[in-house]
Image: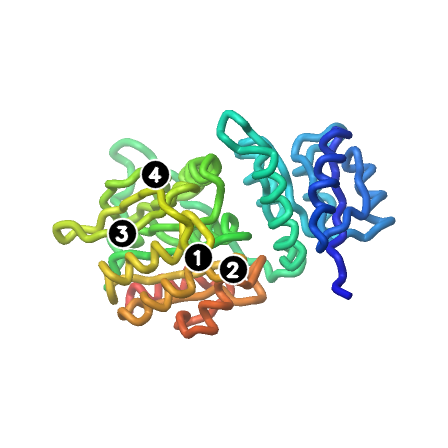
Amino acid sequence: MVKKIRVLVVDDSAIYRTAVKKALEADPAIEVAATATDPYDALDKIVETRPDVMVCDVMMPRMNGIEFIRRLLPQYPIKVVVVSSVSEIVLDAINAGAVDFVAKPDMLKGRTSKDFTDELVEKVKVAASARTPMERPRAPVAPAAPAAPAGPSAPAPAAPLSTTKRLIAIGASTGGTEAISTVLSQLPPTVPGIVIVQHIPPEFSRMFAERLNKLLPLTVLEAQGGEYVQPGHVYIAPGDKHIRVKKVGGRLRVEVAAGEKVSGHCPSADVLFQSVSQCCGADAVGVILTGMGSDGAQGLLAMRRSGARTIGQDEASCVVYGMPRVAYEIGAVERQVPLSQVAATILQMISD
């Protein structure tokens, strides 16, 4: 008999706890081991029931969910899925150690209760097989370069990198926001343009881009379509649209468009990688990071076959070793490295 995933549901609303418990237990692979009203109650329930996954709200009485995660994980390496209204606070929760997040229902945005519960069930299942921060090697994160002072005393701009590549394409899913932050924080502002697919709801893709833009010396934006790729710029796909790169008059242009899911996702890393293989050939580097499923594997293989250099994140440093595993097994990955070495490997490949 297959062991069920044991879940602890934490929220101060009795109505919410009941609704989530009912939705989770409708799936035969899940059982709700306990519910709790706040972090202090939750800690007692964790000790008593030893759940595999905890689902918790970010905003709770007595202690918010982010502080709870920070205090909890060093003692109890439980997998955490947070739920929240649309807010940048969920990115803080991921940074604190949560595996993933689910946006609450919002009828004004067309997000129904069924959408919410379906996504929650899926992400609980993914989280059950994920690695917590305590189970992964720590990746040193280089601090963002300080802003240059204004005025005549400002230093001269950094010299462009000596590079043979025109573009870096990155695909990621579960655990990807932190992995992407780690990689980008170690790249100089003279790096070739970067185009990214991260599986994330549309409201959060903009917040993610804005957050990175504030923290990093790179220029990071959510792509709107029509942008020409520039060095030191990062273009993140909107959470509900595919992103492609097209050669126009000898320049590379970003295109964004709605479409059917490809490899189970929109945006899809396969769509991005396939477009890069067609317009850049050997003038690109492809990177596939942590994530569930197989999105990006076939596209990365097309990139490698067209002459591009390719990198896959290794199993030990992944939150979920899904996408990189499939890519590695089909021969799409030229070099498989820990997250802490991805940026250095990119810099080496663009200079070869």
Nearest to viewer (mark 3 / mark 2): 2
Q: Given contact means CB atoms under 8 Å apart, are the residues at marks 3 and 1 in contact?
A: no
| SS state under label 3 | strand
- Kindly identify the amino acid type of the residue bearing the numbered disc 3: Val
Nearest to viewer (mark 4 / mark 3): 3
- Kindly identify the amino acid type of the residue bearing the numbered disc 1: Ser
- Kindly identify the amino acid type of the residue bearing the numbered disc 4: Ala
Relative horizontal placement of residue 65, taking residue 306 as reference (left or right): right
Q: Which residue does the numbered mark 1 point to in the structure image?
A: 263
Label 3 vs 1, first from the N-terminus: 3
Depicted 264 relative to depicted 344: above or below: above
| SS state under label 4 | loop
Quadrant in which the C terminus appears: bottom left
Nearest to viewer (mark 3 / mark 1): 1
Label 3 vs 2, first from the N-terminus: 3
**In this orientation, which residue lies closer to the viewer: 132 or 21?**
21
Q: How far apart are the alpha carbons under marks 2 and 4? A: 41 Å
Q: Which residue does the numbered mark 2 point to in the structure image?
A: 293
* Residue 164: image location, x then y, percent: 23, 64
